[in-house]
Image (tube, helix red, strand yellow):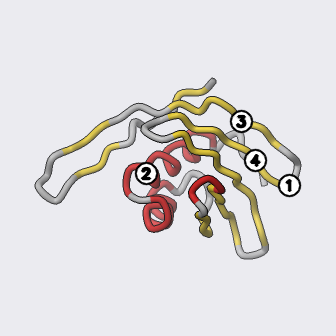
Amino acid sequence: MCKIRHVPIYQESNHRNEKWVGKITNFNCHGTHYEIRIESRSSILVLFGKTKLGAFACMPDFNAGCHLANPKDIFWNTEKLVRVLGKIDGITVACALNALADKIHY
């Protein structure tokens, strides 16, 4: 198990910060993509890989997916993931990818 290094923080429009904990409970390399299980407010399965256009993440349980930047680019990835997953889950996945960036080779 791997704890997410960055505790997700979301700031509401009324300037109230919200914090929560997330854990990476499973991380597997399948050669062509990575499988990541995140336990947080939701249980999220993420399939992360690369195409000619860049990185992508698919969250099959949410019927969602999107193009992403390098796993270290938390700001760009958060913006894209929030659009398809909502604020809490999008921020959580972006933080998890950032925490695993040194282990993801593509």
Q: Residue at x 23, y 51 (%)?
A: 11
Q: Residue at x 72, y 46 (%)?
A: 104
Circles 3 and 4: CB atoms closer than 8 Å: yes
Please provide percent x and percent y for residue 42: 48, 41
Q: Quadrant of residue 62?
A: bottom right
Q: Which mark is residue 34?
A: 4
Callout 2 secondary element: helix
For the residue carrying disc 3, how many other residues have a C-alpha within 10 Å: few (<14), some (14-19), or many (20+)?
Answer: some
Q: Label 2 belongs to which residue?
A: 91
Q: Is residue 51 left or right of residue 40?
A: right
Nearest the eye: 26 or 55: 26
Callout 3 secondary element: strand
Q: Quadrant of residue 20?
A: top left
Q: Earlier in the sequence, mark 2 or mark 3?
A: 3
**What amino acid is labelled 3 in the image?**
Phe
Q: Which mark is residue 27?
A: 3
Callout 1 secondary element: loop
